[in-house]
Image: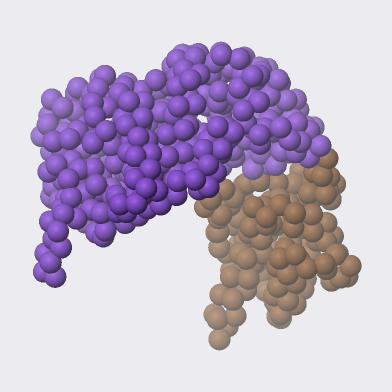
Amino acid sequence: MDAREVRKDFPILDQEVNGKPLSYLDNAATSQKPRQVIDELKRFFEEDNANVHRSVHTLGERSTVLYEGARAKLADFIGAPAPRGVIFTKSATEGLNLLAYAWARHRLREGDEIVTTEMEHHSNIVSWQLACRDTGATLRAIPVEDGATLDLDAFQKMLSNKTRIVSVGHVSNVLGTINPVADIAEKAHEVGAIVVCDGAQAAPHLPVDVSALGCDFYVGTGHKMCAPTGIGFVWGREALLEEMEPFHGGGDMISDVWIDHSTWNEIPYKFEAGTPPFAEAIALGAAIDYLNAIGMKAIREHEIELTRYALERLAEVPGITIYGPTDPEAKGGVVSFNLGDIHAHDVGTIVDGRGVAIRAGHHCSKPLMRKLGIAASARASFYLYNVEEEVDRLVEALGDVTRLLGAGA
Amino acid sequence: MSGLDELYKEVILDHYRSPRNRGKIEPSDFDLHRDNPLCGDEVHLYGHVEDGKLVGVAFEGKGCSISQASTSMMTERVKGVSVDNAEELAHLFKRLMQGESLADDERLGDLAALQGVQKYPVRIKCALLGWNTLLEGLKAYKEKQG
């Protein structure tokens, strides 16, 4: 793939920010959208818009076919055996909460344990904390060692017949670490735990095969993979989804309703109460078509090369500390760093002066920040449309930071 | 670096590099630690009051240049000022951050240099951290006095 050609599909990238060409390096926060996705959203609203699963008229049929088509595309995209295991949510966060409510709250009791990791996004910590609070279960975390990877020996020791859920990020949003999900799943299954994988930072960037990962649930979000906001997903093993309680109550999730009780619709609709974000789901389908046309393998290779280049160039910056794995093959396209003791927000503001957009803060990963002994970090994260010149501009802009605020400690 | 000169004015950078009134006051009439949990800015503020005047004010802290410089500038401005005047200044500074054109208000003095923060909405809370901590400290002091 040629990132220079790919860029032309993204209208937003063709602009100047603060008098400089925009270098958008905040893809772990959200991705930009290609014309193909924007056009499909517009086309849908202009031609096919109608509520799904309800109306017998022609537009309702079209809309339903497109919505279910998006589900099938997504199932195929993540290697799920069938579309009926794919639930649409509004975000990955909602997906994790769905599992914490519909699975954990009904099955956990005092003494049970949920295992997450120290490098998780808050959504993969707090959702489980709330379930623990309501059930008396305990939340534990696999430690991060050497500031980069999970301590699997410690994980092995943590496992027991009390372990009911192991929930691990596929790719860390801060360190970029690609976690050994298949190994973790195998070990977790040996003690009878279910395995949840948070794929928010993985599905947009590398080929995902939930069968090979061996997890029981896989959660992701659309807006980080060229689709609009407001659409996420949970894939789950059908047998588990069948035995699960619903998440929200409302229309579409029921089979029949009386005043004193109701029966549930079949999966996945049991978990999709109310009018779903069908326009966003259909646009996610268009995003998947777009990514597939380029190829997830090609995207992954592009990001590895760009990350390799970024790690080399950033290492030249005086006073820089780079966090996470140093091997670009072992990580997603995410590079977190600090410049001396200069606060990341100053770094973010100053590089923005050169049109370079990076994230600065704790990245919704405060336990990891604490483990790394820092309050915040700057983070550059790449996608299929990023090019080496943008890394160069970041490195130049970091020179401005040092000139303005000193080299730091 | 266009536009950044408005934010990172020389007087602000000077306070960032060489913070004034840095340290502790013991014993003090108020000392409290506050942070901006979203960005990790921290300020620990100490105040000593005599005859209704804030005769001593000092801070420790870490965080971004704006939070630390703003707090340093605050300590310089409110030192020696009456408790009531310090509160008034805090409210005036908050109005400045909320977008009012107060740069010519003589009461602000050097603090007017922070007006550039208005254009960076996410940084306003950084500039306000020290001032909000001061308001809390003064309130606690007054309550203690009855």
Image location (x, y in percent) of residue A397? 74, 30
Question: Is residue B124 toward the left or the right of residue A49 in the image?
Answer: right
Residue at (32, 32) in percent of width and height: A72
Q: Nearer the viewer, residue A153 or A361?
A: A361
* Viewport quadrant of the C terminus of chain A: top right
Q: Is residue A364 above or below residue A339?
A: below
* Viewport quadrant of the N terminus of chain A: top right
Image location (x, y in percent) of residue A174? 48, 32
Residue at (74, 58) in percent of width and height: B118
Q: Nearer the viewer, residue A326 or A5?
A: A5
Image location (x, y in percent) of residue B94? 70, 67
Q: Quadrant of residue A170?
A: top left
The colour chain A appears in is purple
Question: Is residue A141 toward the left or the right of residue A239 in the image?
Answer: right
Residue at (66, 34) in percent of width and height: A11
Chain in brown?
B
